[in-house]
Amino acid sequence: MSDNTLETAIKDNAAGPKSASGDAGSVQQHSLTDQIAADKHIQSKEAMKTKGLGVKLVKLSPGGTV
């Protein structure tokens, strides 16, 4: 699921009712905290797929000296 789709789903679920019932039955959504926790878990798994530690080492040398 892409980030935009997941963000949109969380926003839609937050704006809508937690549960709904009708003639056909009732429906209840996962809590918002569960959805946010799932989003964080998915993002952390995506971050682990990238190579490196997220830190870039660069050697700096002062200019003008030989």
Image (tube, rainbow, N blue to C red):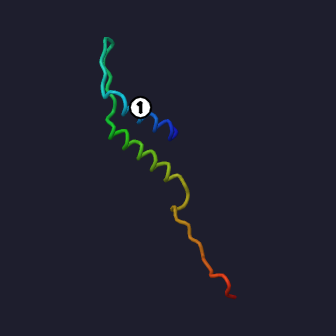
Amino acid under label 1? Asp
Q: Quadrant of residue 65?
A: bottom right
Query: Image quadrant for the C terminus?
Result: bottom right
Residue at (31% x, 35% y) in the render: 31
Closer-to-camera residue (61/35) = 61
**What is the secondary structure assignment of the residue under circle 1?**
helix
User: Considering only vertical position in the picture, is 59 above or below 65?
Assistant: above
User: Considering only vertical position in the picture, is 56 above or below 32?
Assistant: below
Residue at (46% x, 35% y) in the render: 8
36 lies left or right of 2? left
* Whole-percent x, y for residue 1 in the image: 50, 37
* Whole-percent x, y for residue 11 in the image: 41, 35
Residue at (56% x, 70% y) in the render: 57
Residue at (46% x, 49% y) in the render: 45
1 lies left or right of 35? right
* Whole-percent x, y for residue 35 in the image: 37, 38
Closer-to-camera residue (14/19) = 14
Question: Where does label 1 land, which residue?
Answer: 12
